[in-house]
Image (tube, helix red, strand yellow):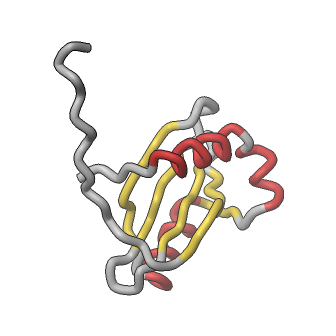
Amino acid sequence: MKLCIPGGLGACLLLLMAAPAVAQARNCGPRDMVLDRLATTYGETRRAIGLGSNNGVMEVFASDDSGTWTITVTMTSGLTCLVASGESYETLAEALPMQDEDT
């Protein structure tokens, strides 16, 4: 199952490019501690992953039970930063639009 957020994914990728600056302004910590807190406090598990141009790893965590979600970025140093979070998470499985056979 793939998570597709057409407009939002581009915004996340832009955040990845600014990850070093983000690390100074966001809540950051060792990856294992951040993931443990997301799991124990919010019941969130990883739902999507992507690689930024600066080799930062963007991940989306969410909980079906609570509806909470969190986007993190992990830099090559191993530091994981919280980029965004919210509520009312839904998993979508939208079909791609049909393509013309002439193209």
> In the rendered image of this protein, does residue 82 appear above or below residue 36?
above
Rendering coords of residue 24 (x, y %): 82, 56
- Occupied quadrant, residue 67: bottom left
Q: Is residue 44 left or right of residue 32?
A: left
Q: Residue at x 30, y 60 (%)?
A: 92
Quadrant containing the C terminus in the rendered view: top left
How many discs appear? 0
Query: Quick one: 61 or 5, which is closer to the camera?
Result: 5
Q: Is residue 51 left or right of residue 91?
A: right
Query: Quick one: 30 or 9, which is closer to the camera?
Result: 9
Query: Quick one: 66 or 34, which is closer to the camera?
Result: 66
Rendering coords of residue 66 (x, y %): 40, 85
Q: Residue at x 47, y 82 (%)?
A: 42
- Occupied quadrant, residue 64: bottom left
Residue reaching furthest top? 102
Q: Residue at x 39, y 61 (%)?
A: 46
> In the rendered image of this protein, does residue 54 appear above or below residue 3?
above
> In the rendered image of this protein, does residue 36 appear above or below residue 20?
below
Rendering coords of residue 21 (x, y %): 81, 47
Rendering coords of residue 50 (x, y %): 46, 42
Q: Is residue 5 left or right of residue 7?
A: left
- Occupied quadrant, residue 81: bottom right
